[in-house]
Amino acid sequence: MIALLRELTAAYGPSGREEEIRNVIRDKISPWVDEIYTDTLGNLIAVKKGPENGKRIMLAAHMDEIGLVASYVDEKGFIRISNIGGINPYVAVGQRVTFHNGITGCVCYEENITDFKDLKLDRMYIDIGTSDRGITLDCIKPGDMAVFSGEAIEQNGRFISKALDDRIGCLILIKLAEMIKDCPNEVIFVFTVQEEVGLRGAGPAAFSVKPDIAVAVDVTNTGDTPECKPLAIELGKGPAVMIKDYRTISHPKVKNALIECAEKNKIPYQLEVMSVGGNDAGSIHTTGGGIPSGAVSIPCRYLHRPCEMVEKSDVTNAIKLLKTFVMNPEYRS
Amino acid sequence: MVRKLAELTKIDGISGNEQGVREFIIQNLADKSLKFYNDSIGNLIVKGKSVGTSSLKVMVAAHMDEVGFMVNYITDDGKLKFSPVGGIDSRILIGQHVRVGRNKIPGVIGYKSIHLQDKSERKSAVKIKNLYIDIAAKDKENALEMVNTGDYVAFASEPVFFGENRIKAKALDDRAGCAVLMELLEEVWPFEFYACFTVQEEVGLRGALVAANRLKPDIGIVLEGTTCADVPKVKEHEVSTVMGKGPSLSFADRTSLADRELLEHFFRTAEKEKIPYQWKTTVSGGNDAGRIQTSGTGVKTLVVSVPCRYIHSPVSVLDLNDLENMLKLVSRGLHTLPGALGR
């Protein structure tokens, strides 16, 4: 699993620039699906056909990751930046970042900041080691984007990496495509774009796929670290079935079917009740005439940092849960 | 184009009340044989001339509406309380001339004079809820003979040409885009071309969504008037755009990301044809592209803007050379688009 995860997290793919990660995923999933295509906005849609009388189930994981966008290059070659998705300036400080063409940059801040409360991205910049606007512009143009650097590792039963949000979801979908056989339902694996900037890719994808049911597979915050805000999600206690977040209230049938699948198959699970955040289900469930939607979330510490952390057992249990779910999405014990 | 722009800024068209702008555009269509219709929400959609073999369907959008106010209460002594329609800086309001309602009743936005303000009042900006519009009514009854709650209020500001090739006017955002779009309708396109003059952009990009859902285009180009803070004490990376340096290309704002292929094509076009252009240096604000991009099964979008200083005020300023170059860039970029995209 770590080998695949390493490839998925290493692939470059900030919102709107998902080509590289899309190519990696296409390579990995192609052998296991009947049809695969990319839509207008860049969503990758892979279909595993089912019998005519089956349901059409869309599973969505987003390919894009957060990043920094070059907005202006000054005379000395420093790159001014803005955020693509939720990047906290405190987290970005001192990080190494990588551009699409492999150029590495150091994220630093204006030295006259004495109070860290004043730290904002518009007082920060990326230094790629040049001293001249022209040389910088030969490498990086305004609009080019950088992502956190760093390789995925496995340690003490956990994965640590950048972009686990949501490459771990992508991994789960790829594994499912490989494992699902003789499914009575059609499963449409959708790897979405531009989730981090406002769930923009999933809605149009759902609009063309028109599934009967949709489940987003993403990550969620945890409440199991020192002095953190109370939150009933812990690493290692199983995947979380979303009840609600800021953008979605899960459809009761989808949510209940997921819970029943877990109970019946003795798969550990938790319940996700969030007042902030959102995932692709948020734009899928209101698409067209409405699509019953829910989400399965992998508990993840240190979200949107280069050291996001998930537990391997939560991932394998999520795969088990989703596998039984797509076989019978209307579970009634 | 310049004359049309000046005329367009004279018209009052606060979000939801764009009919004056719509009528002007229809009356001034270069070619009277062009087919057009108003959709259910009020967008004006004009089908451009095309002779092409390209399979592309292109929607070019500019919004007709402008920011302004609406009367929401009339006091017993005949003063009008009001709320903003769209984003307006309340610090610029005291002393403004306005026009109220269909009959364009003249009014001024008032507050007690500086003599009567205590120290703390002088130091802080007055909130809109404490301001009122004075239409010289004797009392409520007298006011109601002239205006009513729900009446729109527009800045009373006439266009003025000044300096070298600059114009100062209200509503340059986005009558500038409308003026360019009207010019584009004089050309013959190699693909299906729809000019969409949209409504209600300033209150949440509402018209564009309806237009895009109906048209289902492959490409959406949005023409905007955008922020320009090339003024004292703003750092060079925070200016957004610089006046006189040409139209700006946006790689991202708060509502959409430019399609990379489109962005590269337009920037290469500018370089190749030696049309001045600039990158917008800030990722702020939003516009119709946000709704067009995610409509239907998704649409590739790009935003091209003309820099406007003091945007959303009665005295926004625009460089007419930037406007000419915007027309040139959009026109050249669109004509060569089928080749660039291989369609």
Image (tube, coloured by chain):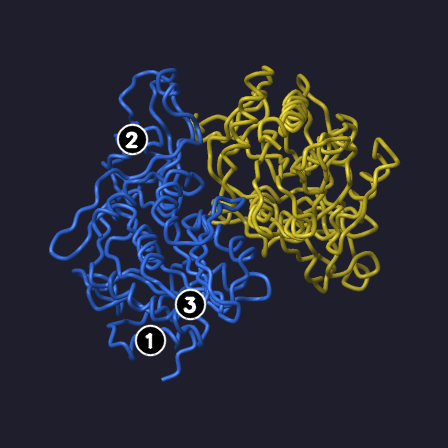
Q: Tell me the colour chain A is drawn in.
A: blue
Mark 1 vs mark 3: give the one in front: 1
Residue A72 position within the rendered picture, expressed as x and y whole percent measured from the top left: 42, 27
Q: Residue at x 72, y 30 (%)?
A: B190
The residue tagged 3 is A294
Q: Residues within 10 Å of mark 3 (few under 14, many from 20)?
A: many
- For marks 2 and 3, the one nearer the N-term is 2
Q: Chain of mark 3?
A: A
Q: Quadrant of the C terminus of chain B?
A: top right
Amino acid carrying label 3: it is Gly
On screen, residue B308 above or below A300: above
Q: Residue at x 38, y 22 (%)?
A: A74
Q: Residues within 10 Å of mark 2 (few under 14, many from 20)?
A: few
Q: Tell me the colour chain B is drawn in.
A: yellow
> Mark number for residue B148?
none
Residue B340 position within the rendered picture, expressed as x and y whole percent measured from the top left: 58, 27
Mark 2 and mark 1: Cα distance apart in space: 53 Å
The residue tagged 1 is A261
> Mark number for residue A110?
2
- For marks 1 and 3, the one nearer the N-term is 1
In this rendering, would A278 be left or right of A171?
A: right
Marks 2 & 3 on one chain: yes
The local secondary structure at tag 1 comes to: helix
Q: Quick check: marks 1 and 3 in contact, CB under 8 Å?
A: no
Q: Quick check: marks 2 and 3 in contact, CB under 8 Å?
A: no
